[in-house]
Amino acid sequence: MVYTEANNQNFSEKFQNDKSDFSDWFKSEVGRIQNYNLNEGVIMPKQVLDWVAPD
């Protein structure tokens, strides 16, 4: 499972175009484990809950 948190809708496109060593490794591992290609356009799911634990 991959959890991602981002503050803007362009995150997916920026991540897709990131060619750093870590990004290449991470996308390769996700593809190997989950059979999911993060180099293709990814439609992020709609946020349905935003919760913060009370202090």
Image (cartoon, rainbow, N blue to C red):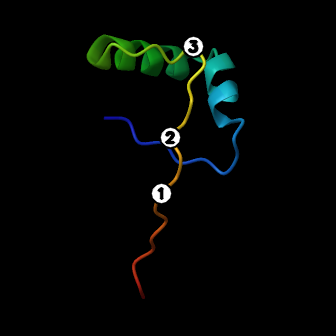
Question: As drawn, is 2 to the left or to the right of 27?
Answer: left
Image quadrant where residue 15 sits: top right
Q: Quadrant of the C terminus?
A: bottom left
Residue under numbered circle 1: 48
Mark 1 and 2 residues: CB-CB less than 8 Å, in contact? yes
Which is more N-terminal, label 3 or label 2? 3
Question: As drawn, is 32 to the left or to the right of 16?
Answer: left
| Mark 2 and mark 3: Cα distance apart in space | 15 Å
Give the mark toward the camera: 3 or 1.
Answer: 1
Say what secondary structure mark 3 lies in: loop
Residue at (62%, 20%) from the top-left corner? 16
Which is more N-terminal, label 1 or label 3? 3
What amino acid type is highlighted by mark number 2?
Pro
What amino acid type is highlighted by mark number 1?
Val
The answer to whether 50 is drawn above or below residue 42 in the figure is below
Q: Which mark is residue 40?
A: 3
| Mark 1 and mark 2: Cα distance apart in space | 9 Å
Instruction: Please provide percent x and percent y for residue 49.
Output: 46, 62
Q: Quadrant of the N terminus?
A: top left
Crowding at label 3, few (<14), some or many (≥20) Cα neighbours within 10 Å? Answer: few
Residue under numbered circle 2: 45
Say what secondary structure mark 2 lies in: loop
